[in-house]
Image (spheres, rainbow, N blue to C red):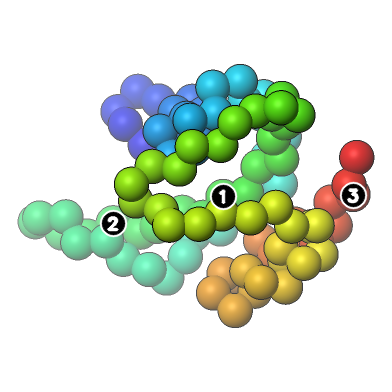
């Protein structure tokens, strides 16, 4: 997050920077967890907050990944939850798994 940004503003900006998607609508936050990951920032460190939001984009939106990424994919909520549970807290993946496809 940049100083003065809300979490939703940060989400919209980051999605645009990483995927090129400009028309993102934040539907609702699903879960937020303070992880045990620490990020070093001199003179101390800060905690990493993991958040999951339900969002909508235009069906014909073109995804253009930034140079930071090599691949992407679309997954049903249950499949996405299963793939993410090896790395992320259960509080987040359970909420993803509950989503229904529209």
Dot 3 crowding, Cα within 10 Å, few <14, some 14–19, many 20+: few
First of labels 1, 3 by sequence position: 1
Q: Quadrant of residue 22?
A: top right
- Percent across and percent down for residue 21 are 55, 28
The residue that disc 3 covers is 100
Dot 2 crowding, Cα within 10 Å, few <14, some 14–19, many 20+: few
> Vertical placement of 76 versus 67: above or below?
below
Q: Nearer the viewer, residue 8 or 58?
A: 58
Rounded to the nearest whole Å, what is the CA distance between mark 3 and mark 2?
Answer: 34 Å
Rounded to the nearest whole Å, what is the CA distance between mark 1 and mark 3?
Answer: 19 Å
Of labels 1 and 3, the one closer to you: 3
Q: Residue at x 19, y 61 (%)?
A: 40
Q: Quadrant of residue 83?
A: bottom right
Q: Nearer the viewer, residue 20 or 55?
A: 20
Q: Residue at x 56, y 50 (%)?
A: 51
> In screen coordinates, is 14 left or right of 63?
left
The residue that disc 2 covers is 46
Q: Nearer the viewer, residue 59 or 87?
A: 59
């Amino acid at each position: 997050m940049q100083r003065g940004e809300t979490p939703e503003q940060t989400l919209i900006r980051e999605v645009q920077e990483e995927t090129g998607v400009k028309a993102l609508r934040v539907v609702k936050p699903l879960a937020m967890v303070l992880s045990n990951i620490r990020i070093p920032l001199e003179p101390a460190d800060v905690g990493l907050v993991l958040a999951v939001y339900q969002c909508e984009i235009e069906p014909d939106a073109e995804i253009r990944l930034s140079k930071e990424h090599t691949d992407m994919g679309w997954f049903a909520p249950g499949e996405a939850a299963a793939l993410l549970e090896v790395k992320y807290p259960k509080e987040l993946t359970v909420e993803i798994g509950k989503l229904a496809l529209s």
